[in-house]
Amino acid sequence: MVRRFLPWPLPALLAWAAAWLAFVALQRAHLPAAWALVLACGLGTAASLLGGTWWQRGLIAAGFPLSLALTGAAGLPAWAWLVPLALLLLVYPLNAWRDAPLFPTPPDALNDLPDFAPLEPGARVLDAGCGLGDGLIALRQAYPLARLEGLEWSRPLRWLCARRCPWARVAQGDLWRADWSGYQLVYLFQRPESMARAWVKGCAEMAPGAWLVSLEFPVPGVQPHARQQAPGGRAAWVYCTPREGRMSDTTKVTTVSGITKPSITAE
């Protein structure tokens, strides 16, 4: 919500200013410089969540320690400069950068999804890579009777997501090692290059006729069951895991009122 009212680069400027104010105040309180650096960098790393993209978040988190190093405002031991990197890796582990580092799902992006991927009440739905919970919030609006679960690699983000979405079961783990077999729908907002791997995993583990939904990025070479045009121009690509009478490779897709539906050709 905050990102909607703080156009770039205002989040970065505010975060850097807050980190500097915290650093100066802690030093005036006679806290050792190394501890002042740790706490100020922690504040900057937490504020990096205001960034809308991974590079914006990286700039927000790195801005204060870089400016401190350039100004030479603090005499710190050499090891202290590892603190900003450690904090950044804590929130955004290496494998999270390889997949999708905290891409938030826009509000109302999935409201029309039940028209194309219907679920029974109590169906299990997974947000694979849930970040701070934006996807879970959108899924709850779309499927209020579903059992919502989130999976997030970063422990701090998982902790924050669990408190932001207390009605969902949020676990820490690797989405690629998790078992998807018990879910009737898996939702992803990943990178384009991740989608082929996600489709292979979904087909191998999920029941026939289950749903795989990707915001923004389609599965290359695979015909979607439907394409929902979300508010803001983003598309939700809906895929159905193979079953008898599944769509053939010659299925055609047509668009009606901003919603793309397939015309199915039986095999």
Image (cartoon, rainbow, N blue to C red):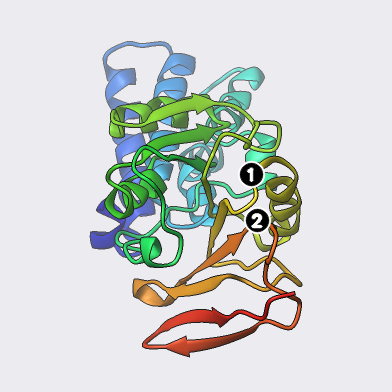
Left or right of 123? Residue 231 is left
Image vertical order of residue 78 relative to residue 46, above or below: above
Residue tagged by mark 1? 207
Mark-to-mark CA distance, 2 and 1: 7 Å
Helix, strand or loop status at disc 2: loop
The three-letter amino acid code for the residue at tag 1 is: Ala
- Comparing 72 with 21, the one in front is 21
Labelled disc at residue 241:
2
Q: Position of residue 210 (x, y in %)?
A: 57, 51
Tell me the residue at 33%/49% (across/down). Answer: 143
Q: Residues within 10 Å of mark 2 (few under 14, many from 20)?
A: some
Residue ID at (67%, 72%):
247
Q: Quadrant of the C terminus?
A: bottom right
Disc 2 and disc 1 in contact, CB within 8 angstroms = yes
- Of residue 3 and residue 155, the one placed in the foreground of this image is 155
Q: Position of residue 257 (x, y in %)?
A: 36, 88
